Amino acid sequence: MLVSDFDFDLPEDRIALRPANPREAARLLVVRPDEGLEDATVGDLPGLLRAGDALVFNDTRVIPARLFGVRRREETEVRVEAILHRRLAPDRWTAFARPGKRLKVGDIIQFGQREDRACEASGLTATVAEKGEGGELTLAFDLYGVDLDLAVAAVGEMPLPPYIAAKRAEDEQDRTDYQTVYAREDGSVAAPTAGLHFTPALLEAIAARGVSNHFVTLHVGAGTFLPVKTDVVAEHRMHAEFGVVSAETATALNAVRAAGGRIVCVGTTSLRLLESATTEAGFIQPFADDTAIFITPGYRFRAADALMTNFHLPRSTLFMLVSAFAGFETMKAAYAHAIATGYRFYSYGDSSLLMRAA
């Protein structure tokens, strides 16, 4: 398949710059392959689930991974923006940086400064330790462990997706809005956005329905924002991300399936991790490893029966994933309906509930 097969036109005014308030007031497009589409709201979700079903959430926590700084070399000074991507050690991260081509191994970057602000902190310095072929840098910081975490939290900004950051600046409200209410494991540089719709009240209503909640952890990297640069889908390579499915969660989800319940993944990150942890026979195993799973039409799903997910970018790996899950033609029709009827797209936008195609 070609990447162009997954293209579509999206009006600029469909891109949400703020989330719905309250969160569960967002619209929800229910997609049942071979049955049609249903317009609902996220608040209707409990009634769309059955007793015995299981929701699977990604409990990763977004860190303020967008850093601004200055590289000084002899008489020259270059302002640098870096998005932390993946932690390698207590003092090392890989990062995507701009302007990456002007940075060399050995360069020292002082973070905590940008053009429109005075220096916010003076204690976060990194050395460019390596440059990768894909444009990634390895940054070796002068702080270690918790001290580095605190410094990043002090000078960093929430890494809003480019399609939001290009239209407005990050602000204090994003520290709450761009975080799920159940986030607990620090490590992501992008939110598992389907989970942004949930509130404590909605979670209580779901539990009252007889639906169980389960948590896995996939730390989302900045690679999720990168465009697909190949023309042929099969030639694209995903960035690896670290995920954990505990033995307790694996056992509980296997029991749900054995009892006839459905596994409903909240977000593509939960789905990708769960599929990575499931055998060909459909048995979910404990997992603690990197995954670079790339799901496209033709993939045979092993674990997930339904998927709650926001509306994704044209030509993106995530639109390919939902097309694999509910069917290519079904999703083309669903997105056309969403655009025509005013659904809000992307991270702060509305959501969908997809039933798996046969």
Image (spheres, rainbow, N blue to C red):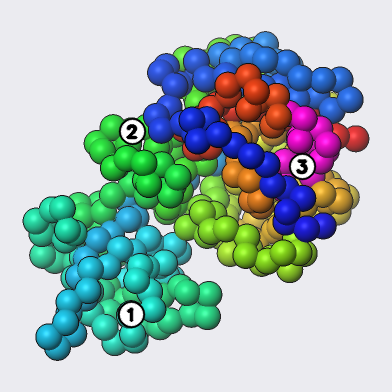
* Residue linked to disc 2: 176
Q: How far apart are labels 1 and 2 at the CA level? A: 34 Å
Amino acid type, residue under disc 2 in the picture: Thr
Q: Return the disc, 1 or 3, that comes first in the chain's sequence.
A: 1
Which quarter of the rendering shows the N terminus? bottom right
Look at the image and say whether residue 74 sits in the magenta stretch.
Answer: no
* Residue linked to disc 1: 102
Q: How far apart are labels 3 and 2 at the CA level? A: 31 Å
The residue located at (32%, 36%) in the rendering is: 174
In the shown orientation, is residue 338 left or right of residue 93?
right
* Residue linked to disc 3: 323
SS type, badge 3: helix
Amino acid type, residue under disc 1 in the picture: Arg
Residue 106 image offset from top left, x and y in percent: 29, 87
Quarter of the image where one finds residue 276: bottom right
Quarter of the image where one finds residue 323: top right
Q: Return the disc, 1 or 2, that comes first in the chain's sequence.
A: 1
Instruction: Estimate how packed mark 2 is, as few (under 14), some (14 to 19) or many (20 or more) residues with alpha carbons within 10 Å.
Output: few
